[in-house]
Amino acid sequence: MAKAYDHLFKLLLIGDSGVGKTCLIIRFAEDNFNNTYISTIGIDFKIRTVDIEGKKIKLQVWDTAGQERFKTITTAYYRGAMGIILVYDITDEKSFENIQNWMKSIKENASAGVERLLLGNKCDMEAKRKVQKEQADKLAREHGIRFFETSAKSSMNVDEAFSSLARDILLKSGGRRLQNYLTDLIFDQDDENIRFGLDKVPLEVFLKDMIDVQALSWNLSEDCRVSADSAFRPRHEDSQAGPSVPTVSTSNLPCWLVEEFVVAEECAPCSNFQAKTTPECGSTGYVEKITCSSSKRSEFKSCRSALMEQRLFWKFEGAVIGLALVFACLVIVRQRQLDRKALEKVRKQIESI
Ligand SMILES: Nc1nc2c(ncn2[C@@H]2O[C@H](COP(=O)(O)OP(=O)(O)OP(=O)(O)O)[C@@H](O)[C@H]2O)c(=O)[nH]1
């Protein structure tokens, strides 16, 4: 069965305890708000599919506990995140100062190049404001990331913030595809004409991606600029060094790297046979079958299933419940011991009368 979405992006919210991470996720996923505060234990997630530039983007949004005691568990989830949202509370200066520590934590634990976004939450509480918008603006600029002031209570800027992060991730993936096209610029050695390698990539696919990328941002991302630079350099050198410079082609690349594709079979664990015969099983142990739109080729692609994430989550929940049961048993045993001692004491006092 084909997927009901084009991309799955995993996002993570981090920030001090009580800044409103859970409320932001609930507002975004369920359009709801609750004033009562129940601190998150460990990690949890919600899902919402949004429409960005005509693409269905399924956002799996992970909520982390802000309390220090859960740090080891929550940082383990940074690695798989494609976007991380740093949240502070505009009425709590300490939560803003701590953003620097959360940034450090991303650097140490997340994948390089993860998209980040800064949110100053509870902006409905203007009378209690302790962090000025300009301070946060400056911090965001220093780190080269976007910044919004939000309110989970009034829902101000909540959808905008999540959509902007999804858009940036989409732009980055579009940039990566463009990088492949640019790398495909080749020098035709036979007639010594410089030729654009579009014979390897369908023109309409290339143009569509160019338009997508341009529509998302008029400034090419860092990735694109670097790749454009590196793609043009060999061609320039070619004209001086002659035909001995090797040409670069994407024809051996998987089709999903250079074309639009649809998922024909959902991400699933590899069977024993697939594990032996399909190299894509190597990295995660899961594969999905995709069909490339232009070449109509069907290929396997390594993937990370929501099931994997859920299993990790339930393992953690199981460990927490197990631990709670052990402590409950200890408390009951100790209580019984104390009761017995008290009864013994009373009995001795009665006997001595
Ligand atoms: N006025 C106002 N209160 C908010 C807002 N967002 C959250 N709150 C309140 O702030 C408190 C903490 O919210 P949570 O979402 O549970 O905070 P958290 O960051 O998930 O906290 P941890 O789970 O401990 O990390 C709750 O009482 C919420 O009602 C907001 O935008 N405006």
Image: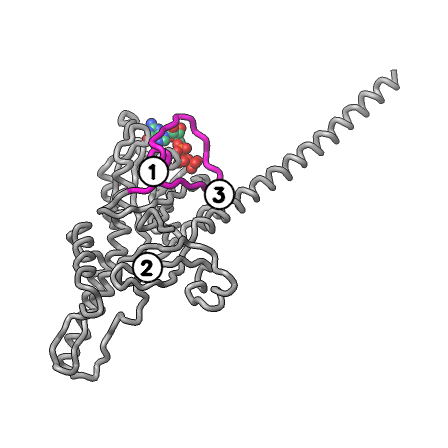
Residue 38 x %, y %: 45, 31
Q: Is residue 33 above or below residue 86?
A: above
Residue type at tag 3:
Phe
Res. 291 mark = 2
Magenta stretch: residue 14 in it?
Answer: no
Q: From the viewer's perspective, is the residue at label 2 or at label 3 nearer?
A: 2
Residue type at tag 2:
Thr
Q: Is residue 335 left or right of residue 16?
A: right
Count of all numbered marks drawn on residues in the image: 3
In the foreground, 69 or 181: 181
Residues rendered magenta in the picture: 25-50
Q: Is residue 59 left or right of residue 317?
A: left
Residue at 88% across / 18% down in the picture?
352
Pointer 1 residue: 88
Q: Which of marks 2 and 1 is nearer the N terminus?
A: 1
Res. 70 mark = 3
Q: In this view, does 279 lie above or below 332?
A: below
Measured in 3D between alpha carbons, the distance from the residue under mark 2 to the one under mark 3, in whole angstroms, is: 41 Å
Q: From the viewer's perspective, is the residue at label 2 or at label 1 nearer?
A: 2
Residue 59 x %, y %: 34, 45
Residue at 74% across / 26% down in the picture?
339
